[in-house]
Amino acid sequence: MQFKANGLTPEFLKELYYAIVKPRLIEEKMLILLRQGKISKWFSGIGQEAIAVGATMAMDKDEYIMPLHRNLGVFTGRDMPFEKLFLQWQGSYDGYSKGRERSFHFGSKEHHICGMISHLGPQLSVADGVALAHKLKQDNKVALAFSGDGGTSEGEFHEALNTAAVWGLPVIFLIENNGYGLSTPVSEQFICKHLADRAVGYGMKGLTIDGNNILEVYQTIKEAREYCIKEQKPVLVECMTFRMRGHEEASGTKYVPKELFEEWGKKDPVKNFEDFLLDKKIIDQQYIDTVHDEIHKEIDAGIAVGLSATPIVADTATEMANLFQPTPVVAETPTADMPKTEHKFIQAISQGLEQAMEKFDKLVLMGQDIAEYGGAFKVTQGFVEKFGKERVRNTPLCESAIVGAALGLSLEGYKAMMEMQFADFVTVGFNQIINNLAKIHYRWGQNADVVVRMPTGGGVGAGPFHSQSNEAWFVHTPGLKVVYPSTPEDAKGLLLAAIEDPNPVMFFEHKALYRSISGFVPDDYYTIPIGKARQVQEGEDFSIITYGAGVHWAMEYAAQHPEYSIDILDLRSLLPIDYEAVAASVGRTGKVLLLHEDTLIGGIGGELAAWIAEHCFESLDAPVMRCASLDTPYPFAKALENNFLAKGRLGDTVATLMAY
Ligand SMILES: Cc1ncc(C[n+]2csc(CCOP(=O)(O)OP(=O)(O)O)c2C)c(N)n1
């Protein structure tokens, strides 16, 4: 192995030595503790330390790194105290994730480390968002994301690299090519010669280097960093290395030919660097002993604290309180004296978005065709002229990378609104929403200041993939807020509240209401708090509890049936639900019909019916009825669509309820 110091000072080379020895010594100790049954699981990076350490040392301390499960050197390289790391691995409340995350699946804002989710690839897109923030701030900073060779087969790898290249983002994508996925050799993972060769396909620079040579890694990443800043472009760096242990300690290495261990054992990154420094007389044996002693002392002290730490005690109130970043109280601000203008539903959304862009200069809009074209529904028409292309961004066709990038923007203090062209397409951005946006605050305290706008619903003859109601998927995901307005005034006020909220909000907009519903909307900026239902009208005979298009179906039904006094409640928010308003409505009528366009099984109606049965049993004079769409995919032909939609069954459901 050829080491080239290229002008690095002896002091710095010693610093690098300390930095690479530390994770090795920690790991050696962890393997002993594992055998003693004192820790539960370990993902080893032994033999790969030069990559995590060299790359971390090449970055500024305030630049985000997105490490994976084998990158202890990133955590130690950012000077995280061993004691707290050990508490983290032990699941202690005093670790970095209050006992909520395991091994290396955590981050720390203080250390500019973004915690991975198990799905690996999503880290790459989050780095895009961080890099976008740097580009917008023009602060000459870079983001660095890790991927394994296995992770490069994920769609997210393609989406993230392509987006970074198209947007000219200063991000370093670093592949640790260690020969194996879990047990899958690289020959069964890809067939190109070098993974870095893929870079040219994205229009970016790609390099393959010796990942066991810490000086080569350090210098390459240092130069890559400067290149990213100067050229405002991404780089792909493939580091060749080898995984000297099993995927995790319990899984063994039977499938790895023995000679590979011998071959790569000779290329050990720690031993070779040590020999080089000894040879150059930069360090001597005494220095090595002193470094080992010092690190061992820190390890032993940390283990003593960790093993005697008070076991975690679950407290439900704390767990629930940490789900979201605390939100400043959002006032219900539209007042009677505010000047109002009549607008269509879609204009109200547009106006809200425009006023949010004026109020928050760190708000970035992203979506397919939202720039010059104005979006599929023209919500952002004229926005580019007013706010510029930096903040109103056309995206490549890659929902997952854009949700990930939206999260990355949050890491650097930005707000993001992503427009799904149709709510149906959220399926290809699902992982980032469900596993990253929704869980990140609970896991390690980072908020996801993201609104995903979801043009949803049918009635417009658009068939199975442009009509679905999928709000229930998200209502079942703790950590998200789900909002679904039915009037222009609510749409604007709730959208502004969603944008103010530092937590992830799924914002559903029914497409059929866009141009069919008008109403008076306050001209100025105002908010309507998330989680508060709206009493559409009070009544005595029965309640219709609904949201979205259902509100208009209920109003139409009520207008056609003056013989009934109907209590209509518009939920407006589906997560959280305004249970107080639900209970009040049930109390007034004793008969409840839950109405939604979404299909029946697993819909919000089921959840509400259960809640009403549990909490309002004494008020009920009849079983709670649900009226929902048919449990089939959404059909295209008008007759099938009409048959599918809940609306056609509303009259019959009312009749059954009233006949009880
Ligand atoms: C989406 C997803 N599929 C499967 C897994 C299970 N899994 C965890 S790590 C791993 C192998 C990863 O290989 P690679 O990316 O090369 O990283 P390495 O572990 O070698 O560092 C697999 C299959 C996962 N975590 N996420």
Image (tube, grey):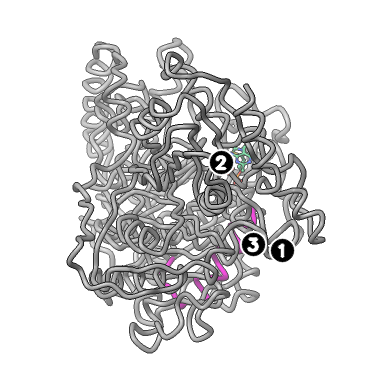
Q: Does 160 appear in magenta?
A: yes
Q: Quadrant of residue 653?
A: top right
Which residue matches tag 1? Answer: 193
Q: State yes or no: Cβ of the residue under disc 3 lies below 8 Å from any atom of ligand 1.
A: no
**Residue displayed at 54% across by 64% down:** 513
Residue 324 percent location from the top left of the image: 31, 40
Nearer to the camera, 482 or 13? 482
Left or right of 561? Residue 585 is left
Left or right of 550? Residue 86 is left
**Residue displayed at 25% across by 56% down:** 61
- Which of the two discs, 2 and 1, sits closer to the camera? 2
Alpha-carbon span between mark 3 and mark 1: 7 Å
Which residue matches tag 3? Answer: 195
Decide: few, some or many residues near mark 3? Use Cα within 10 Å; few <14, some 14-19, many ≥20.
many
Residue 71 percent location from the top left of the image: 43, 43
- Label of residue 472 in the image: 2
- Label of residue 267 in the image: none
Outermost residue, front direction?
Answer: 563
Q: Which residues are magenta?
A: 154-171
- Which of the two discs, 3 and 1, sits closer to the camera? 3
